Image: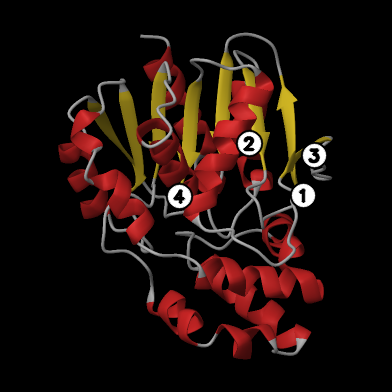
Amino acid sequence: MNDWILSCSYDFKGRDVWYGTMGDGPPMVLVHGTPWSSFNLRHLIQYLSIEYKVYFFDLLGYGQSSKVEGDVSLAVQNKILDDLLAHWGLDNPIIVGHDFGGATALRVHLLNNRTFEKIILIDPVAVSPWGSPFFQHVNAHEAAFAGLPEYIHEAIVRAYVQTAAHRPLDEVTLNGIVAPWLGEQGKAAFYRQIAQADSKYTDEAQQLYHKITTPTLILWGREDSWIPLERGKELHKLIPSSTFRIIDDAGHLVIEEKPDDLVREILAFTKT
């Protein structure tokens, strides 16, 4: 799985969204967050596809999907997911979302009225306030960042994504994360998706969390420095039907750090 290439594309209003499937069995949809891609879900996909037919894709503006200028905010990502679910012919799959992928799953459920058999959220961006000082700085100076020399940009991305992990990332993982953000188009896309991040899109869903009746599992890296554990506990209180589990010795990038623990929790939840 070192050469991560998605084999299929879906045209969303003139922009390509790339996706893939793996395995057989009941449908399960995996949605990545920012600044990640489906590459970072590869461990979960490999293990979960033993039991399920797993559907995965790169959010618009991320990974192998189109990075041309346009809306890549949370406001459009749930619309894309809604279209993909229709394209795949899925009516009631299990859905798993990490970071912005969790926000996208919640938005498509609450705003697009998509039903899911079960919802699994991994360190999701779901409760305001959120957004690091780096996010806020890029928000105010997107053009300046997009004009950085390539070597400085790459150094920034490498340093930034490493802070999401509790322990140092290996070079294969780090290179896989950074690669989509290199080159002029990748560089512009990296700062664009940060500049378009806005808590108003999570606020739209947050006010509706109390209406969720679908069985929901919330998984959280204990050492998450991007979205502290307290946010997870708050989300658990806001979703009446939720179960909360903490993954020890892992940060926000728990999908890379502790995939075995996540799979164990996910399968225990989905099989009950």
Front position among marks 4 and 1 = 1
Residue found at x 71% / y 74% = 187
Tag shown at residue 14? 1
- Three-letter code, disc 1: Gly
- In the depicted structure, whether residue 267 falls above or below residue 13: above
Residue at 48 percent of width and 68 percent of height: 163
The mark nearer the N terminus, 4 or 2, is: 2
Earlier along the polypeptide chain: callout 2 or callout 3?
3
User: In front: 163, or 270?
Assistant: 270
Q: Which residue is mark 2?
A: 43
Q: Tag 1 or tag 4, which sits nearer the N-term?
A: 1
**Residue depicted at 35% across the width and 34% down the height:** 110
Neighbourhood count class around disc 2 (C-alpha, 10 Å): few under 14, some 14–19, many 20 upward: some
Question: Disc 1 vs disc 2: which is toward the camera?
Answer: 1
Whichever of callouts 1 and 2 sits on the residue coming sooner in the sequence is: 1
Q: How is the image coloured?
A: secondary structure
